[in-house]
Image (tube, helix red, strand yellow):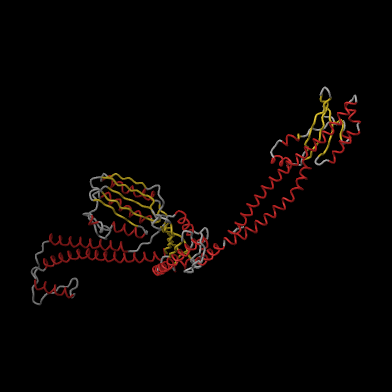
């Protein structure tokens, strides 16, 4: 049960009064217990003296002291009268063996009397200990004992034993305690009444301040308190008014900033929300409201998301550790069609380093995929333009060479027939000549030209070589541009390189290249084994051919960030010039004497088809590193 300040004050005052009353009552009761014990001892001593004097008279007159005391009616009447004494339970005379000689209860005469605790020993203790002895347990009998002696030898022949009951003393104290209990309850009632009135009087300013704070919490502006008191509450009221004015100004400024923030982020594709250090929502843009339909400013993150939701765990970790988290890929959205989103949290700290809030950002990966698809399409268009320009250049050069050598052949065959050659050239330009057509003027006599067979064959060889070169260009273009079907499956890099190394090893041994492969303890990649084998084989062979005078080639595989695997080909060859780094993946670009310029272009295309990346780092004279990043299976 929750107690307010008023209840606590009343309870505190009542408790203090109650403790005081209880302590005083215990002290009073302990004094009454001491008085009761003293009175009981006095009665027992008085009774014992009466029995002692009568026993001396009886014993001095008779020969057998025990029989004389047993037969004396006066002594017996004194013992029996002890029943009317307060707190006395028995009175008896016992011999030295504790056998009852004379007892107020005749049936106990001749029996051994059990020993009791001495009354004098309890009287020597403190008052509180005496009170505990009286009220502890089921009660017990205390004894007052006085010895009997024979005159004139003063020989002890027995003792007078008076029994005192603590139960009787307890009952007597309980009767005396009733007025004290009534007084205690009356004091408590008065204390509660006084404490209530005092709390009502003292807490009135607190109620006024509480009312003002409630109004501030509801968002009211310009709240003021009128506490006309010249004490601490008056100072508190003045301070409250100053804080209220400052809060009003800050809220006005914050409202403007929130409006600007909403204007800035309301058109973002990313879902954005801001939480305060207690996990309460301060702001959410339309994209975030679409993800959380029941979102409302001031709502707790516990109410917005289930306890096992990964976004809630991410936000709670940032609130607890005050460190940014993510990005993490999470399925989030409608249950029927959840979308994969990239979620991250950013801790917002003030200049002192204290946490003032957490910004939650959820980025739609489907939208990013669309953007990336557009970028890839743009890259493909750009690559297609570069490719077309390269193909046009590669095709133009062989055609020019063929035209030149064909013209040389034509001149050799028509060196003695210039008119015919001129008309044939004109007809050829107009497209009127066909294969095998011969145009001769009427009346002209044809003479056989002098043709050098070796020179003609040389021109034919050149034309055939250029045609072959042109065919290679066209075939390379078709191979590069023709779409291929990917057969994606988990591929073990260790097993893949076990197939590649036997092919690369002879070339490496021929060039004195030390080959090292470290790819057996990495995750599998998602790819087409055949295409990856060809791409890695091209990279390995290119690396070996870059070290004509020997060197080392290290192929190293490792897990990379973002669930990817990095395959690095590091050689110690001649390196790549900086001006060539931007062109090495262009189709038909090569720096080799007999290179085709297709290998690295095919590698780049293969990596792109696998949704991967390829990076190049090279230092001329020291070596080159090609790093391929592929997604894990």
Considering depth in this image, is 39 or 164 the residue closer to the camera?
39
Residue 573 in view in this figure: yes
Q: Is residue 195 above or below residue 25?
A: below
Q: Determine the residue located farthest toward the top in the rendered image.
A: 153
Quadrant of res 360: bottom left
Count of numbered labels shown in the rendering: 0
Q: Determine the residue located farthest toward the bottom in the rendered image.
A: 442
Q: Is residue 377 above or below residue 128?
A: below
Considering depth in this image, is 455 or 449 the residue closer to the camera?
455
Q: Quadrant of the C terminus?
A: bottom left
Q: Give the percent coordinates (x, y) of residue 91.
A: 84, 35
Horizontally, residue 185 falls left or right of residue 526, namely right
The residue that appears at 25% across and 62% down in the rendered structure is 473
Q: Quadrant of the N terminus?
A: bottom right
Quadrant of res 208: bottom right
Considering depth in this image, is 370 or 120 the residue closer to the camera?
120
Q: Give the percent coordinates (x, y) of residue 95.
A: 84, 28
Q: Give the percent coordinates (x, y) of residue 159.
A: 82, 30
The residue that appears at 45% across and 56% down in the rendered structure is 318
Quadrant of res 597: bottom left
Considering depth in this image, is 611 or 428 the residue closer to the camera?
611
Residue 336 in view in this figure: no
Q: Give the percent coordinates (x, y) of residue 341.
A: 44, 62
Q: Is residue 26 above or below residue 191?
A: above
Q: Is residue 108 above or below residue 447?
A: above
């Amino acid at each position: 049960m929750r107690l307010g300040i008023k209840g606590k004050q009343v309870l505190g005052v009542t408790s203090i009064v109650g403790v005081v009353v209880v302590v005083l009552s215990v002290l009073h009761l302990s004094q009454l217990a001491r008085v009761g014990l003293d009175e009981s001892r006095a009665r027992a001593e008085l009774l014992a003296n009466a029995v002692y004097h009568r026993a001396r008279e009886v014993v001095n007159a008779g020969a057998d002291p025990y029989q004389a005391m047993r037969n004396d009616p006066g002594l017996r009447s004194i013992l029996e009268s002890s029943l009317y004494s307060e707190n006395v339970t028995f009175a008896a005379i016992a011999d030295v063996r504790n056998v009852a000689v004379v007892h107020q209860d005749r049936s106990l005469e001749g029996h051994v009397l059990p020993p009791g605790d001495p009354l004098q020993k309890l009287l020597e203790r403190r008052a509180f200990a005496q009170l505990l002895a009286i009220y502890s347990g089921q009660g017990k009998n205390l004894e007052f004992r006085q010895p009997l002696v024979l005159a004139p030898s003063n020989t002890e022949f027995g003792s007078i034993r008076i029994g005192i009951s603590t139960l009787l003393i307890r009952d007597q104290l309980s009767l005396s305690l009733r007025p004290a209990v009534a007084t205690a309850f009356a004091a408590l009632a008065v204390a509660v009444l006084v404490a209530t009135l005092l709390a009502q009087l003292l807490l009135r300013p607190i109620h006024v301040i509480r009312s003002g704070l409630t109004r501030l919490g509801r968002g009211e502006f310009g709240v003021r308190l009128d506490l006309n008191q010249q004490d601490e509450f008056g100072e508190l009221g003045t301070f409250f008014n100053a804080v209220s004015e400052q809060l009003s100004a800050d809220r006005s400024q914050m409202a403007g900033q929130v409006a600007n923030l909403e204007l800035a982020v309301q058109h973002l594709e990313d879902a954005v929300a801001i939480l305060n250090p207690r996990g309460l929502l301060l702001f959410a843009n339309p994209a975030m409201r679409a993800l959380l339909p029941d979102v409302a400013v001031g709502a707790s993150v516990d109410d917005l998301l289930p306890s096992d939701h990964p976004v809630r765990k991410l936000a709670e970790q940032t609130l607890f550790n005050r460190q940014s988290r993510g990005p993490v890929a999470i399925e989030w959205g409608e249950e029927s069609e959840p979308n994969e989103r990239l979620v991250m949290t950013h801790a917002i700290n003030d200049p002192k380093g204290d946490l003032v809030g957490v910004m939650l950002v959820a980025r739609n990966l489907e939208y990013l995929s669309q953007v990336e698809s557009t970028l890839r399409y743009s890259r493909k268009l750009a690559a297609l333009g570069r490719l077309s320009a390269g193909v046009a250049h590669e095709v133009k050069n062989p055609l020019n060479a063929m035209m030149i050598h064909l013209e040389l052949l034509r001149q050799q065959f028509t060196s003695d027939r210039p008119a015919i050659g001129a008309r044939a050239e004109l007809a050829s330009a107009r497209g009127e000549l066909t294969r095998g057509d011969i145009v001769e003027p009427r009346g002209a006599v044809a003479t056989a030209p002098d043709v050098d067979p070796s020179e003609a064959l040389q021109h034919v060889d050149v034309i055939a070589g250029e045609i072959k070169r042109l065919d290679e260009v066209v075939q390379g273009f078709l191979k590069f541009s023709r779409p291929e079907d990917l057969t994606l499956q988990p591929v073990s890099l260790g097993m893949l390189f076990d197939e590649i190394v036997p092919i690369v090893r002879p070339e490496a041994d021929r060039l004195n290249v030390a080959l090292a492969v470290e790819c057996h303890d990495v995750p599998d990649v998602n790819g087409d084994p055949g295409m990856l084998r060809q791409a890695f084989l091209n990279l390995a062979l290119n690396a070996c051919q870059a070290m004509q005078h020997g060197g080392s080639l290290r192929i190293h595989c490792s897990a990379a960030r973002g669930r990817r695997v990095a395959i690095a080909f590091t050689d110690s060859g001649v390196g790549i010039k900086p001006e060539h780094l931007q062109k090495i993946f262009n189709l038909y670009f090569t720096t080799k004497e007999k290179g085709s310029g297709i290998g690295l272009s095919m590698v780049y295309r293969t990596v792109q088809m696998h949704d991967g990346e390829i990076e190049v780092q090279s230092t001329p004279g020291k070596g080159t590193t090609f790093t391929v990043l592929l997604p894990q299976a």
